[in-house]
Image (cartoon, rainbow, N blue to C red):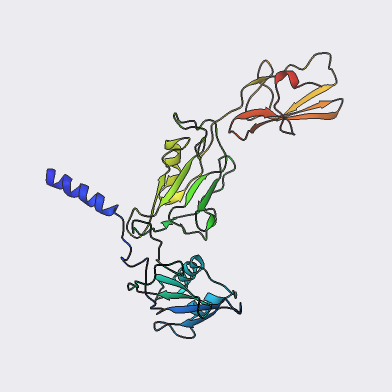
Amino acid sequence: MKLLSLCTFLSCVFSMRSELCDTNWKSCSNVADIATITCDTATRSDCDVVNGSLTTSDDESVLGLVVPPFTTIDPETCRKKCQEQADSAPDQKCEFFRWFKDHATKETTCSLQTTCEHDQWCDSFDCATGQLPDCDEDGNRIFPCPLASPTVWDNSKFHVICTDPLLGDVNVYDSMTTSVPGNTVCSTIRMCAAWNETGVEASEPFYRKLAIRCNGTVGIGAGTLEPMPITGSTDLSTAMIVGNTIVEQKCDSTCPELTINIPAEQYWADLICDDPLEEGGILKDGNSCILLCDNHLKMSIDCRFTREGEKQWQDGEGTELTAATIKC
């Protein structure tokens, strides 16, 4: 029984281990067996591309690398071109890239390749290499997290924004988005006062918010969605992850009950609400009204969120309303 438990434990640990990058990923020699993109920084003419030994001159995954045309290339763009070729090629996919700036010829090259052999000279600011997917400083591969389906937009819940530190915003509501890059963080756009987990200070980035991230270094061949450690609610941040789909969550903050007593002498005042007021003239969250004074609109009365995630009764201009201010 103990042996079985040990085997089960080891199996679990193995399934969650990280995959290591090639030992030479920071200093690859120039193999360029997929393609070479060359840009002349002196003439500023359009960059051109030449196929490598594993591709042909009419290979669309290579020819499309310089469409639309551009005149310069940096290490990050070189990495993106490697990813672009890998995404479009049926086989012979780019896995390593090598960016090099030659001060003598004024040319900058981006080599796309399938292998990486050590280059002892590629360790200066004029040479940069890398592997797909990205690697962290400890040499772990950073995989994207797959998405089984797009996030459903629900107006009764708080919407989510996802941001990759390198690529910017990632639209998880788009059915064309099938994964989020490693290290992408997804959080609710707005605060909710009901998400007030003890110990989370207002200075924290996810104070009164929910947040998850793609941990690209945990898993085999794919990253793992997981809740961020410090958020407004650990339980609801965890609930954002349903399988491989990101799910919006509802904020349970409510407006306080408001007793409306319009002075009796204001006989020209008319309060019109979506639903009748509760007994005693009580206005509850979920209802809204307008106040007419001598048949002219005086104010609207709606329950709205503040920037801090509180809910309060406001007029059409966002001014907080109290029982005393609701009158003609």
Q: Nearer the viewer, residue 264 or 83?
A: 83
Number of marks: 0
* Farthest-out residue, bottom: 57
Q: Is residue 180 left or right of residue 280?
A: left
Residue 261 is at least partly visible in this image: yes
User: Where residue 140 sits in the image (x, y, percent)?
Assistant: 34, 58
Q: Residue at x 53, y 37 (%)?
A: 250
Q: Position of residue 237 (x, y in %)?
A: 45, 40
User: Is residue 299 found left or right of 232 in the rendered image?
Assistant: right
Q: Nearer the viewer, residue 8 or 105?
A: 105
Q: Position of residue 150 (x, y in %)?
A: 50, 54
Taking the spot 53% from the left edge, 71% from the top edge, the residue there is 73
Image quadrant in which the C terminus is located: top right
**Looking at the image, can residue 1 be seen?**
no
Residue 236 image point, x, y percent? 45, 38
Q: Residue furthest right?
A: 294
- Taking 190 as reference, is 124 above or below it? below
Image quadrant containing the N terminus: top left
Q: Is residue 45 or residue 103 the one in the foreground?
A: 103
Residue 84 higher or lower than 170, as above or below: below
Question: Please, is residue 259 above or below residue 171 in the view?
Answer: above
Residue at point 45% right, 85% down? 56
Looking at the image, the residue that sits furthest to the top is: 264
Position of residue 219 relative to residue 235, above or below, is: below
